[in-house]
Amino acid sequence: MKVPCTIMRGGTSKGIILRADTLPADAAARDDIILKIFGSPDRRQINGIAGADPLTSKLALIAPPSRADADIDYTFADVLIDKPVVDYSGYCGNVTSAVAAYAVDEGFVRPVEPVTTVRIHNTNTRRIIKAAVMVKDGHSLEQGDVAIAGVPGTAAPIYLDFADTAGSISGKLLPAGVTVELRAHKSIRATICDVGNPMVFVRAEDFAIAPQATVDELNARRDLLDAFEDLRCQGAAFLGFIKDGRAVSASVPSVAIVAAPADYMSYSSNQKIFAGDMDFWCREIFIGSIHKAFGVSETVAAAVAALIPGSVVHDVTRAGAAERGRVRLGHPSGIIAADVAVDLTPQGPLLRKVSVVRTARRIMDGHVHVS
């Protein structure tokens, strides 16, 4: 059997794009083929085409729109590397940028120069993500001058608007209130924010983590990662993601540790990242290890939480972010920014805007053989 596929980089992730109508309708049979395409379960994914890294073992399943206000249906899955699991619980904002360019090039939307708006129905959350794609000669434009931390070179911008994703899992932007006490080695003050992909935020100082600690140093601390997994599962309970006493997703929610701006060395370029270029320092724990960058969907949650007074993130955020309307996160590979606006109403914070700039590139079209 051979299956048509496309491989694209979207932001700091790489995804395998498959058409839903080329796979079995039965979910179990479909996922079995997906696992074989990716080469899971196997730490090297040697028998498939995925990259043996959580940031490259990602699926975008594409179909015509199932609702009138969308141009394309996008179902995301994290394909676990060492387990036979295709996890549809969350979605990837980075891969969303690849889907936006794909929608233009594959005729899901009529290309309009110089900018085409793509309305992406993310079926995981049942929400619409709007993307503004640069277009030239009827195709998405790849060449440009936008650089994003963790990706070599520059490319054309793709603007993603996630405002519709607030409360998409729990129905509330703050399902546990502004803060909640969770339990790790001690009682930990946390904020759970449900927008983009929901996240549990805790302070680095509660775990004696220095901002200069590297990804490899943190990943070597098994006790620390175990504590974050425990916090993640506690956060999952507030999102309704617990079944039979266990978290139903390996990726949602994820946990982020945050601190005040600080200098450190970039994981991807070994260049110094300066405190003055960020509004707060952060590290994401994604599927059991420290993320080498920071997910776009998670950036959305972090940026919104930064503008909510009393939240764990707001406590460490540089003053003036709300007035600027832009929040800059310092992650292992550099800086990622989100444009965000939150109204502080008597009924609680109301999200008006949250958008992120990404880039994308088509790497390969062809067929993958499955046996």
Image: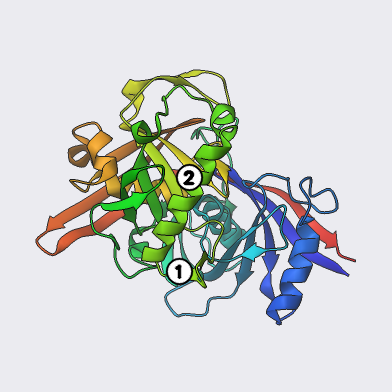
Disc 1 marks which amino acid?
Thr
- In the rendered structure, are the residues bearing label 2 and label 1 in contact, judged by CB atoms less than 8 Å apart? no
Q: Which residue is mark 2?
A: 227
Q: Nearer the viewer, mark 2 or mark 1?
A: 2
Q: Earlier in the sequence, mark 2 or mark 1?
A: 1
Give 121 or 44, whichever is nearer the viewer: 44
At x 44%, y 48%, the residue is 255
Amino acid on which the number 2 mark rests in the picture:
Ala
Look at the image and name its color scheme. Answer: rainbow
Quarter of image, res 259 = top left
Q: Find residue 55 and report its horizontal and vertical position in percent.
A: 62, 46
Residue marked by disc 1: 125
Asked whether residue 354 appears in the rendered view, the answer is no
Considering depth in this image, is 261 or 95 the residue closer to the camera?
261
Question: Which is nearer the eye, 296 or 216?
Answer: 216
Residue 20 at x, y percent in the picture: 67, 73
Q: Within 10 Å of the Cα at label 2, are there few (<14), some (14-19), or many (20+) other Cα atoms?
A: some
Q: Residues within 10 Å of mark 1 (few under 14, many from 20)?
A: many
Q: Is residue 22 above or below residue 139?
A: below
